Image (cartoon, helix red, strand yellow):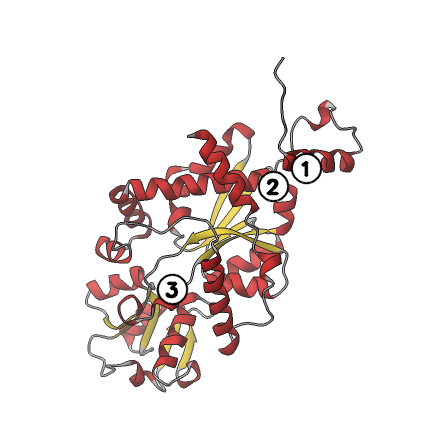
Amino acid sequence: MNRITWPRRSLLRLLALSLALGVAPGTTALAEEAKPDVIRIGSTAPGHLKFILFRNQKLLEKEFAKDGIAVELTTFDGGSAASFALGSGAIDLTYIGNNPSLRLAASGADVKAIGLSSWVPSNETTIVVRPDSPIRSLVDLKGKKVAYLSGTVRHSTFAKALQAEGLSIKDVESLNIGLENSGPALSRGDVDAIVESTGPVQKLVEAGQARVLFDAAVSGRPEWAVPYPISVNGTFAKTYPEIVERILKVDIEAARWADAHPDETVAIFVRETGNSEASVRATYADGKFHLDPEITSKAVEALKGEERFMADADLLNGMVDYDAWVDRSFYDAAKAQVAASN
């Protein structure tokens, strides 16, 4: 007769659930762990790369179809809105930038960083002006109207770029405007410059509507590239730990698939975002997408450095407790599941 050995973590969960339900361990009432009716995941529009792969190939829908669990993928106009939804429990996981993730963690919200959405070594922030603009350097932006979404990674990178030139964010007139409005505003002359992600703003450049003033991928500093965390609502993680592990399993598989199929990955990203193929390939110049979700000690140090900058630049209230915020156990369990399935 074969003996079934339960992992210690599963046994503890089983016991806890039995006590909560008032059922003795070993009864049929514990045959299945609690599961949600729906999993809600958010990302900043148009979506981080793995989020886009999830949506395009319905990877999470396929993973959870056998459980009868629906999956909702929602995009937000900025990481701040997504992080607020995560903290409130309106969504369960986020794939967003480091700045909104750090602000939410510093606020003391019940959230966990369980992985990395990406950690691209080049910084994806570009500053553009009108083609006929007399502005030729970052220093020339002093006193000018500059449009960007407040609280984003672009906001942070812009502040760092100004600081490197002896200026601060207070030396410009900041307008909290997204690209859908800032693009037309630049054409009309209502703003003097736009700070945006490289891909979307490149379309303005290629259309002859803008000129690149500063490209952080070219002229920025390596330390400006900081990982983007995957965060989960704490209550969701405690209630459905195995669901979170399975989401990360799919995440790991998607990251490996992307590196094994670079041309198809680029084609999907271009089709889903409308970005030019040239700008996407420039972002992933080495043919790798840097999507491994493991939160390494180096990644934590990079996040701590970004937190220090945000605090000094008045972009952050509170402090992050990294021991409480970072939880690698879900990734470790997910990686073991991937290994076992290969």
x, y percentage for residue 309? 47, 74
4 or 258: nearer the viewer? 4
Res 13 label: 1
Q: Earlier in the sequence, mark 1 or mark 2?
A: 1
- Residue drawn at the location 36% of the way across and 80% of the way down: 164
Any part of residue 80 in sight: no
Q: What residue is pinned by disc 3?
A: 225
The furthest residue to the top:
1
Q: Earlier in the sequence, mark 3 or mark 2?
A: 3
Q: Is residue 284 above or below residue 218?
A: above
- Residue drawn at the location 46% of the way across and 38% of the way down: 60
Per the image, label 1 sits on a secondary structure element best described as: helix
Counting other residues with Cα less than 10 Å from the Cα at mark 2, is it few (<14), some (14-19), or many (20 or more)?
A: some
**Residue type highlighted by circle 2:** Pro
**Residue type highlighted by circle 1:** Arg
**Dot 1 and dot 2 residues touching (CB under 8 Å):** yes
